[in-house]
């Protein structure tokens, strides 16, 4: 930051004083119709926003670097800065320039950060935008999440040990866009590296004063009078309380005391919901795909057919927080079932919901006094559909839908207020009038009449002066410099009467004023200014009165979101042929004809092959699954996990029957990935994840292990895989429900030696060297890996495949053989018949030509020619 010179202009002195208080933010300084940025801020903004860098005199020989954006279109520029992780301080004029004496007073009215955005243009309507605050100590950590745009405030206390992993899992759940913390947390490299790598943000360490009870006790007591006992039950020094206090102090600073929509703290515990760590969320692709991080291809993509922004956010939240309470799950199921069975009601409600705007975020902007007249009308439109929605719920039988019916407030008074005051199509700006309806305010109507009458009076003046002077081309005009004037062409200036006062001479005409015109001008301009001022005052009154109904509107918004999610789940269940699962307290997971909810939707022409699954904590604790790659082992294991998860959010599931015993956590170890930045190999990452799973899983957990031990030597890997399997199966050590896919066929021998282990494999149809995956899970272990056959299917050149067969035979002849003495239950062999043997790359070329041929576009003659060439090439092999 440059130093202020002694001879700096008053405006620049004012700028420096304000910038000194906000050195960590890009300061947008309001000058007239522009937000200007200076010095380093200007250089940064010109680069990131592609603005022209200019200069301004400031008392030095070298001009101050400067760039700016129009204030009426600043949102898009601010959004780009915030998206790149910058804070933006908005500095406005705090007094009317028309009445100010000397330099207009200015001050920062708000600081916009990635986690405090409330503008719709900067937000994804389907996602919450969380600010996270972490207060860390050796004994525990408090983690608080707030979405200012919706008014949600979530708080939890995490206890040692494994605090780092627990905090990372919480971050993975809420995906914050901004993280603030105490100094102790800022020193933990593992968590900070994760946040930086995963979310491209660096946690901001706040001063200790933010986390001092002396600074937040009164604030918390005033904001949450009904929750004081709950908040302070473990003492004001508790890490969770300190995190809450630090977050609210921070918000009060950036929002300039306006945090009125944060009215209730929602406490949650680790045991309240099914535990889903970061790896499980990623591997199961709950809300985004692993490869592209797209919604399409995720479970959310399948289930989310919601119609409202509130419903979209709630669906994502439910998916991230499967329930553990049977009564709550059943309560949700009953609502889905009622809408599942009543297609007419479901479709009518869905149609009405599609007209509902984002009531949560609209109300936040109304409370923060940033909503314009169009947004008030949007709220009114949403309210107008509530009576019809409520009428469809009147006869509901399920408890949850009855509660939704009771919680939908028709808000007739709010609708009437907005409808009577705001015109149907108001302008975007609130400072230029045109928002308030005729008939709403008597004084405003009188001023409008004066303004309208004056226009007619001006026309009459022009007619009268033409008749009086005989100057047929005389006309009345207006500009901001001279106001109203009479314009007379030069050819008639000799006919101008004596009471005309010359005001301006132009090339082709002269302009004059009269006393009558000046009196009219004063009256009209005063009326117009007063109209704009009164309209804004009336608009503010309407906005304030609407804000006073926040709790009623928020309660209605939550009810609409819940109804939207239930309609979506019911629609998906009907469309995809899902069934309602039985939920029990037993340990059993029994699935009949289960299907992968995402994969079956991605298949276009191929039907999905369903499979059964049976797991419990007794004879079917651990299921070993063998079979070749690409045959469907991973798909089967994931579908079991997803069906369990779907059941515990209250959804129907893709199966003909399912009985799901409550699972307290799902853990997955799938795939290979290096952590090169952290200096960890694939195998090290794998073992770290396995270690974490074995530490945190319980007998009520569901574990998915895919190819444990493959990152090291064969014997080491097999030994580790066996040890992990034995630990998971042993009731005295863990005894969790475990799906264990492996290529170590030797492990299938454990079925005969350890209690609770069962062998299954993927059925394969073999015909000579060709194999076909049947996608069917059957009892027993696989007798072959079919690696060479899979390589051939994948398109490995024929020469390589042939050489692999020779090497395999040499190894078997030398005593290195495939495991024997197991039942061959997975292969359905057919007698080998005479067929082409694809032995070299010429064959691959012919196959590639056939694959790329479009038989629908070639003529019969072309087809014969191609066939002749292919036969000729085949004969040369």
Image (spheres, rainbow, N blue to C red):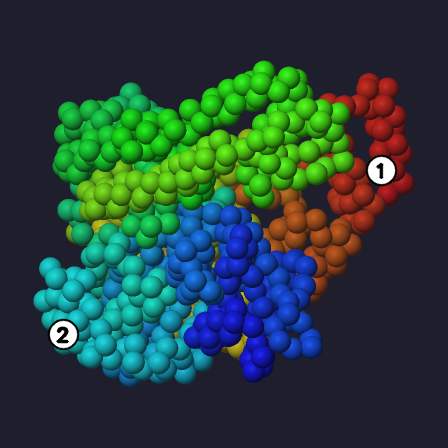
> Residue 172's x, y, as percent?
39, 62
- Estimate the x, y position of residue 797 in percent, counting from the top left: 75, 52
Please determine whether, in this image, residue 493 is positioned above or below residue 837: above
The disc, 1 or 2, on the residue closer to the chain's N-terminal end is 2
State the CA–CA distance, disc 1 to disc 2.
82 Å
Q: At which x and y percent is residue 291?
A: 55, 54
Q: Which image quarter: residue 110?
A: bottom left
Q: Nearer the viewer, residue 194 or 859?
A: 194
Looking at the picture, tell me which residue is in the foreground, 14 or 696.
Answer: 14
Q: Please tell me the numbered disc located at residue 874.
A: 1
- Which dot marks residue 423? none
Q: Which quarter of the rendering shows the C terminus?
A: top right
Give the residue pinned by disc 2. Answer: 234
Q: Residue at x 80, y 23 (%)?
A: 858
SS of the residue under disc 1: helix
Asked which secondary structure carries label 2, the reply is: loop
List the single residue furthest toward the front: 498
Q: In the picture shown, does residue 4 fall above or below 513?
A: below
Q: Residue at x 46, y 65 (%)?
A: 102
The reply to whether residue 724 is in sight is no
Work out whether 593 lies above or below 716. above
Q: Quadrant of residue 243?
A: bottom left
């Amino acid at each position: 930051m440059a130093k202020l010179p002694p001879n700096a202009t008053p405006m620049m002195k004012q700028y420096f004083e304000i910038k000194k208080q906000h050195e960590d933010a890009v300061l947008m300084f309001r000058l007239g119709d522009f937000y200007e940025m200076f010095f380093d801020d200007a250089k940064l903004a010109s680069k990131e926003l592609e603005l022209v860098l200019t200069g301004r005199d400031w008392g030095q020989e070298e001009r101050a670097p400067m760039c700016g954006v129009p204030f009426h279109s600043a949102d898009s520029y601010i959004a780009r800065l915030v998206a790149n992780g910058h804070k933006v301080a908005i500095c406005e004029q705090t007094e009317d320039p028309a009445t100010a004496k000397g330099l207009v007073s200015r001050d920062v009215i708000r600081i916009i950060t990635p986690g405090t955005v409330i503008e719709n243009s900067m937000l994804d309507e389907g996602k919450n935008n969380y600010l996270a605050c972490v207060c860390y100590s050796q004994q525990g950590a408090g983690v608080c999440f707030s979405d200012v745009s919706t008014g949600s405030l979530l708080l939890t206390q995490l206890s040692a040990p494994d605090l780092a992993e627990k905090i990372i899992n919480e971050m993975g759940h809420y995906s914050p866009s901004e993280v603030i913390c105490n100094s102790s947390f800022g020193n933990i490299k593992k968590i900070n590296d994760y946040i930086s790598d995963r979310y491209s943000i660096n946690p901001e360490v706040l001063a200790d004063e933010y986390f001092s009870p002396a600074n937040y006790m009164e604030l918390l007591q005033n904001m949450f009078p009904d929750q004081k006992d709950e908040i302070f039950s473990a003492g004001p020094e508790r890490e969770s309380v300190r995190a809450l206090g630090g977050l609210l102090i921070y918000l009060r600073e950036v929002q300039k005391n306006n945090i009125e929509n944060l009215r209730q703290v929602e406490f949650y515990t680790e045991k309240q919901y099914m535990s889903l760590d970061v790896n499980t969320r990623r591997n199961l692709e709950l809300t985004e795909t692993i490869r592209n991080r797209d919604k399409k291809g995720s479970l959310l993509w399948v289930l989310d057919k919601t119609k409202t922004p509130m419903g979209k956010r709630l669906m994502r939240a439910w998916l991230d927080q499967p329930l553990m309470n049977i009564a709550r799950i059943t309560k949700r199921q009953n609502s889905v079932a009622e809408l599942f069975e009543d297609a007419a009601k479901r479709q009518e409600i869905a149609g009405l919901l599609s007209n509902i705007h984002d009531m949560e975020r609209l109300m936040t902007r109304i409370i923060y006094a940033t909503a314009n007249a169009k947004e008030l009308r949007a709220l009114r439109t949403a309210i107008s559909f509530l009576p019809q929605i409520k009428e469809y719920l009147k006869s509901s039988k399920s408890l949850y839908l009855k509660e939704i019916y009771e919680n939908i407030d028709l808000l007739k008074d709010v609708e009437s207020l907005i409808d009577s005051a705001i015109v149907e199509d108001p302008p975007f700006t609130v400072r230029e009038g045109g928002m308030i309806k005729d008939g709403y305010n008597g004084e405003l109507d009188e001023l409008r009449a004066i303004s309208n009458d004056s226009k007619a009076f001006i026309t009459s003046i022009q007619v009268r002066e033409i008749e009086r002077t005989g100057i047929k081309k005389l006309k009345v005009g207006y500009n901001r410099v001279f106001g109203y004037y009479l314009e007379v062409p030069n050819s008639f200036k000799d006919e101008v009467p004596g009471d005309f006062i010359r005001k301006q001479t132009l090339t082709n005409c002269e302009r004059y004023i009269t006393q009558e015109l000046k009196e009219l001008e004063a009256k009209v301009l005063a009326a117009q200014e007063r109209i704009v001022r009164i309209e804004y005052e009336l608009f503010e009154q309407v906005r304030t009165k609407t804000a006073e109904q926040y709790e009623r509107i928020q309660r209605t918004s939550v009810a609409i979101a819940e109804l939207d999610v239930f309609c979506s789940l019911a629609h998906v269940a009907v469309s995809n042929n899902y069934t309602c699962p039985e939920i029990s307290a037993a340990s059993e997971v029994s699935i009949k004809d289960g299907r992968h909810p995402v994969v079956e939707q991605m298949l276009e022409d191929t039907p999905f092959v369903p499979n059964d699954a049976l797991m419990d904590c007794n004879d079917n604790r651990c299921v070993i699954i063998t079979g070749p790659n690409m045959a469907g082992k991973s798909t089967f294991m994931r579908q079991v996990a997803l069906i369990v998860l779907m059941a515990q959010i209250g959804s129907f599931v893709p199966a003909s029957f399912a009985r799901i015993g409550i699972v307290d956590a799902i853990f997955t170890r799938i795939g290979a990935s290096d952590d090169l930045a952290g200096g960890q190999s694939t195998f090290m990452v794998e073992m770290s994840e396995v270690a974490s799973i074995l530490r945190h899983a319980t007998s009520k957990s569901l574990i998915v292990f895919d190819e444990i031990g493959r990152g090291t030597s064969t014997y080491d890997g097999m030994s580790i895989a066996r040890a992990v399997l034995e630990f998971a199966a042993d009731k005295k050590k863990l005894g969790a429900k475990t799906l264990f896919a492996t290529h170590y066929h030797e492990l299938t021998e454990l079925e005969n030696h350890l209690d609770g282990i069962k062998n299954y494999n993927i059925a394969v149809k073999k015909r000579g060297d060709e194999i076909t995956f049947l996608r069917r899970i059957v009892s027993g272990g696989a007798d072959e890996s079919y690696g060479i056959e899979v390589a051939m299917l994948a398109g490995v050149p024929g020469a390589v495949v042939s050489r692999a067969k020779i090497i395999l035979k040499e190894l078997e002849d030398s005593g290195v053989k495939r495991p024997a003495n197991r039942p061959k239950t997975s292969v359905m062999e057919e007698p080998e018949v005479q067929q082409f043997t694809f032995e070299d790359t010429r064959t691959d070329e012919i196959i590639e030509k056939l694959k790329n041929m479009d038989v629908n576009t070639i003529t019969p003659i072309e087809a014969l020619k191609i066939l002749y060439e292919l036969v000729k090439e085949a004969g040369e092999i």
